[in-house]
Amino acid sequence: MNELLDEAGFELHIRPLIDDDWKLSESPTAIEKEYKFKSFIEAFSWMTKCAIWAEKLDHHPEWFNVYNKVKVKLTTHDVGGLSIKDGTLAKKMDSLAE
């Protein structure tokens, strides 16, 4: 689960996210997305739920919050790029934002 994705793994775990509003970062070693909520409290509540899941998955996002917006960047630092962990956490974040 903590291995750098090969091309087939990228197509399986990351490509569907890119087709659903996630973007590759400037270097293809991370994915990024901006979430927008109705208020600060909704954004912060979502971040709290995500933080619990991130801890369970042992995979922690890089994120930045201003009022009702949260910018998220996911990468697996110890493998130097994208892993299954990034796809798993991204999917969970999307489901929690619904």
Image (spheres, rainbow, N blue to C red):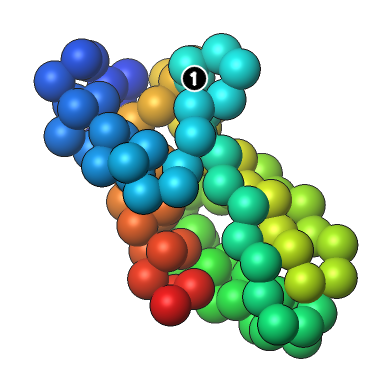
Residue visible at 30% across and 35% down?
14
| Residue 52 in view (yes/no) | no
Q: Quadrant of the C terminus?
A: bottom left
| Farthest residue, direction right | 66
In this picture, residue 6 sits left or right of residue 86: left
Q: How many marks?
A: 1
On screen, residue 19 above or below 2: below
Q: Amino acid at mark 1?
A: Thr
| Residue 25 in view (yes/no) | yes
Q: Which residue is mark 1?
A: 29
Residue visible at 86% across and 62% down?
66
Residue visible at 46% across and 63% down?
93
The image shows residue 19 at horizontal and vertical percentages of 32, 41
In this picture, residue 72 sits left or right of residue 5: right
Dot 1 crowding, Cα within 10 Å, few <14, some 14–19, many 20+: some
Q: Nearer the viewer, residue 17 or 81?
A: 17
The image shows residue 6 at horizontal and vertical percentages of 22, 15
The image shows residue 70 at horizontal and vertical percentages of 70, 59
Residue visible at 74% across and 63% down?
69
Q: Nearer the viewer, residue 85 or 33?
A: 33
Q: Quadrant of residue 92?
A: bottom left
On screen, residue 58 above or below 46: above
Q: Quadrant of residue 85?
A: top left
In this picture, residue 85 sits left or right of residue 52: left
Disc 1 element:
loop
Q: Quadrant of the N terminus?
A: top left
The image shows residue 55 at horizontal and vertical percentages of 50, 61
